[in-house]
Amino acid sequence: MFLYFCSSKSLAFSGGLAIEKKMLQKTRAVVLRTLKYGDASMIVDLFTESNGRLSFLVRIPKNPKKGGMKKQFFQPMTLLELEFDYRQRSQLQHLREVRLSVPYGSIPFDPVKLSVVLFLAEFLYYCTREEQQNAPLFQYIETGLMWLDAASASYANFHLVFMMRLSRFIGFWPNVDDYQEGCFFDLRNASFTLSAPLHPDFLQPVEAGRIVTLLRMGFESMHLFHLSHHERNRITELVLLYYRLHLPQMPELHSFAVVKELFA
């Protein structure tokens, strides 16, 4: 019999059997999706600050007074603090402790904000599937959600700004240095061009100008940009098309049908 310990990213071998080494992790996380698994369990997809995208098997006690795992902790886009044993080779991690990191004051009780958040949860579920550790991305998501929760008005463009600025953190923020009025927007190469690209994935100058308008918006300034209901939905469609070209695994989002009816 022999025992050999390697780094935290490797395995220990005992008696010829591979035993995966565990690492205790404490991190913040945001819930992306929850699926029921059996009678008393859930599979929860989270984006964590320390490890990027992870999935957890969570057992919910039938008596909510027993144990710290509460079903309401795992609603989409809830911000959590976790403690868990990280197993690099495991597809499903197991939580030790969980608690709310930032309790929301308005999102769960406002149907419009809740619809926006559920749309963005589905959006993020596909955008972050391959993401490893990316603390700035997590912090951006957290900051955006806290801003929306605190907002009392003028947030109709929030999902547009949130989606477009997210591209900065995952590698395809558009290059605006060469923009001038009348340019086309090359969706594949994330750049503005004076002539139409040779491929079909580009925007005509009018819609390219809408992308420039969107890139100028921030959470604090977006109320200064007045968009009609039709314009807002069209820009959302263009942003989703842009993401699908750069993330081929992203499908049509079911929740977009709900968001299209908002802010009319």
Image: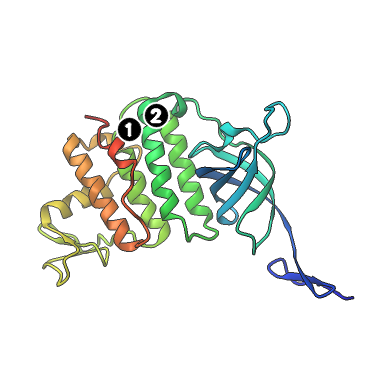
Residue at x 41% of width, y 59% of height: 170
- Residue 180: x percent and y percent? 15, 59
SS label for mark 1? loop
Residue occupied by mark 2? 151
Q: Position of residue 251 (x, y in %)?
A: 34, 54
Q: Are marks 1 and 2 in contact (CB under 8 Å)?
A: yes
Work out how far the residue at label 1 is from the one at label 2, CA to CA, in angstroms.
7 Å
Q: Which residue is mark 1?
A: 155
Left or right: 239, with 122 as reference point:
left
Residue at the spot 63% in from the left edge and 33% down from the top edge = 70
Horizontal side of residue 37 vs 114, given as left or right: right
* Quarter occupied by residue 263: top left
Residue at left 17%, top 41%?
231
Left or right of 264 on screen, residue 116: right
Q: Residues within 10 Å of mark 2 (few under 14, many from 20)?
A: some
Vertical placement of residue 111 versus 60, above or below: above
